Amino acid sequence: MSFPCYILKAENKMGILSGKHIVLGITGGIAAYKSVTLLRLLVKAGAEVQVVITPSGKEFITPVTLAALSGKPVVSEFFSANTGEWHSHVDLGLWADLMVIAPATASTIGKMANGIADNMLVTTYLSAKEHVMIAPAMDLDMMSHPSTVRNLKTLKEDGVEIIESASGELASHLVGKGRMEEPERIFDRVVAFFNKKKDLTGKKVVITAGPTYEKIDPVRFIGNYSTGKMGFAIAEECAERGADVVLVAGPVNITVSHPNIQRIDVGNAREMLAAVETVAAKSDIAVFSAAVADYRPQSYSDSKIKREGIDDMELRLIKNPDIAAAIGKIKKAGQILVGFALETDNERENALRKMRNKNLDFVVLNSLNDKGACFGTDTNKITILDAGGGERNFELKDKRLVAKDIIDAVVSVLE
Ligand code: C5P
């Protein structure tokens, strides 16, 4: 049993959460037994934890255990049956620096996504002023049901941090996605949340993301496979670190919700340049992560081009503006410009040439030869080259963590 190891870890982090107020929400899933370990880790690390449990949560874990470990009576109902005392979800919402719901069942996720405040836990969620993270736990069919997928998407858009469930054997003995993340990992996410530096407070950042679509006719375009995930992750990282972000996004299928992010949607390279130009001069940092189409059709056909009677067709292309280079030309003193280089050969050489030609301070090199480091994946493997000749290599990791590495590099040279 690995429990003693968790405790050891929390002891190492003794005091790291001291003074932090955490509402730990527990719902009615078999994974509720793991919440006891999470609670113990949080308390050992110095946090003040108020447990709020749903009525069905109490079928899985007893409030006596939770009250003993947290040192506070567990809240479940709006009123205490014995004393008639009213439990104020508003006060709890204001008190909490963080709310963690683990496990979060399909039912609670559905209620949260739709504002169905029929218990103390969801009511407290609706009153929570600070960050909320949830660790979903359910059977694999419930997890993949369109309503769960939709509700999780809604919560994500509402700014809730989803701690993805792991795959493995479930309570039903079926094997698949739905196991609640281990308490130690959830604890790490809590610590990471409180450790998040606000080192970009007062800074303005402009970020380009996604592909551009260069129209041929009303139904066709030249584009690429970029999904925008990397640029969106960088935008979220900057926003969480306190920056005011303008995210100029090409046609992508993802959403952002952070209040510090202003999103401008564009279609083609010229629109992207125009949007960036409106804010570039006022920006302290610009990150060019978009995969901008290098060329566009010279002419656009207002009506759909028909194939009847045409065996060979030539499409004449002209060069698009280079957004990074255009901003590099008018770079202000102290401004930091970051570009990307996605290469297949002569990687370092090409990346360094781009950094010089576009007047960038950093170039983030990723190679199409690295598995897991291309368009559409959730991971990336990068090397950060800087104008001073420095080079930092990183292993393959989640794009959110890659975003952190990139922004750490930028912050290290900020005045
Ligand atoms: O020259 P290349 O396209 O490989 O350079 C990549 C870098 O330049 C990326 O940071 C990309 O966002 C930026 N770029 C741009 N406008 C273009 C082409 C590339 O901003 N038209």
Image (cartoon, grey):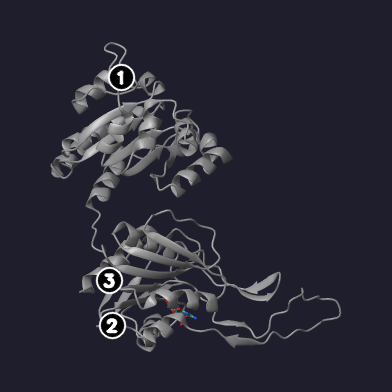
Instruction: Tell me where residue 383 sits by quadrant.
Output: bottom left
Q: Amino acid at mark 3?
A: Val
User: Which residue matches tag 1?
Assistant: 62
User: Which residue matches tag 2?
Assistant: 387
Looking at this view, name the residue that lies furthest to the right: 309
Of callouts 1 and 3, which one flags the residue occurring earlier in the amino acid sequence?
A: 1
In this view, 161 is above or below 374: above
Count neighbours of disc 2 (C-alpha within 10 A) and say few if under 14, some if 14 to 19, many if 20 or more: some
Q: Nearer the viewer, residue 99 or 190?
A: 99
Residue located 71% across and 69% down the image: 219
Instruction: Tell me where residue 97 sits by quadrant.
Output: top left
User: Which residue matches tag 3?
Assistant: 410
Q: Which mark is residue 402?
A: none
Does the rendering let one see residue 188? yes
Percent position of residue 396, x then y: 37, 62
In this view, 200 is above or below 365: above
Percent position of residue 343, x then y: 45, 77
Looking at this view, name the residue that lies furthest to the top: 82
Q: Secondary structure at mark 1?
A: loop
Q: Nearer the viewer, residue 331 or 36?
A: 331
> Where, quadrant-wise, is the C terminus in this rendering?
bottom left
Q: CA distance from mark 1 to mark 3?
A: 48 Å
Disc 3 CB within 8 Å of nearest ligand 1 atom: no
Left or right relative to 186: residue 354:
right
